[in-house]
Image (cartoon, rainbow, N blue to C red):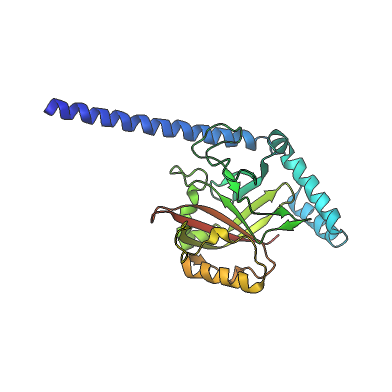
Amino acid sequence: ILALIFIIALAVFGFSAYNIGKYALETKRTIDNINKVAEKIVDDNLDVEEADDEEADDEDSLTPEEKAARDRAKMMKKYGDIYNENNDFIGWLKVKDTPIDGPIMFTPDDPQHYLRKNFDGDYDIAGMFFIDFRCKLDPLEHVSTDTIIYGHRMKNDTMFGPLKEYKDPEYAVSHRDVTFDTMYRPGKYKVFASFLSEASDDHPDVFKYYDFIEAETEQELREYLDNIRELSIYYDEDEEPVFGDEILTMSTCDYYKTDGRLAVLAKRIK
C-alpha cells in the first residue's frame, strides 16, 4: 500500500511539474512574440516637448481632415512595419509603470480571433489584447464613447494580469497614466475608475458594462457612470468623463466569483 501511495504521489508530482514547465514555456513564447513585435516600432527620437509645442501651435489652423492626415502619417511612421506585417494590428497600449505594454488587435468580422492566438496567428494560451468588435475608431467617421480592450488575466503578470493591482485604490492613484495609440491617432488617457462585475447574459439584473459602447445622450452616460460608481473599488470624481468625452475600458477576468470580471476605466485627455 505504501508503495502504491508513493507511485501515485510521484505520478501527481510529475504531472504537476509537467504542467508548470509547459506553462512557463508558453509564457516565454508569449513574451518573445510581443518583444519581437515591439522591435518593429519606429522611434523618431524627436524632442517630445518641442514636438508638442509645435503641434499646439498648428492645431488651430488645421481642418479635421488635415489633422487626421497628419496623425495617420505619424502613426504609420511609428507602427507601419507592424501594420504591414499584420493588418489586424490596430494600435498599442501602454500603462505607465506597469508591465502592460503591447499590441492591440481588431477583427470586427471575427470578434475573438486572437483569444488564443499570437500576433503571427499561432496558438498562444495568453492570446493578444483585442478590441470589442462593436467599437468605432476612425475620428473622421466616428469614435465610440467607450473603446473596450479585452485581455487574459495571466498568473505571471503578462497580458492583463497586472490589472489585479487596481483593486487597491492607492495603486490606482499612482498608476493612472495610459497611452493608447491607434493607427489613426495617438492618445493619452487618465485612469478614473476600477470595479468588479460579472459576465452574465442570463441575469437581466446584472450590470453589463461590456455592452456600453455608445452614449447617445447625456442621460445614458450618466446612468452608465452611476452604475460604475456603485460597483467601484476606485473612483475619481474629478476625472469623471462628461458627455462627449472618450472612455477606454481595459477588461479581464477576476476570480472573486464565477464569471467575475475586473475593469479599469480611463478618460482620454489628449
Q: Say if 119 sits above or below 218 in the image.
A: above
Q: Is residue 216 above or below residue 97?
A: below
Residue depicted at x 16% and y 27%: 4
Residue 31, quarter of the rendered image: top right
147 displayed left or right of 160: right
In the rendered image, is residue 44 in sight? no
Q: Nearer the viewer, residue 268 or 124?
A: 124
Percent position (x, y) of residue 88?
A: 67, 40
The residue at the point 55 percent across, 33 percent down is 32
Quarter of the image that includes the C terminus: bottom right
Tell me if I can see residue 115 in this picture: yes
At horizontal 56% and vertical 44% (from top left) the residue drawn is 112
Residue at the extreme right: 61
Q: Residue furthest left?
A: 1
Measured as percent of width and height from the top left, residue 267 is found at 63, 62
Q: Nearer the viewer, residue 51 or 136?
A: 136
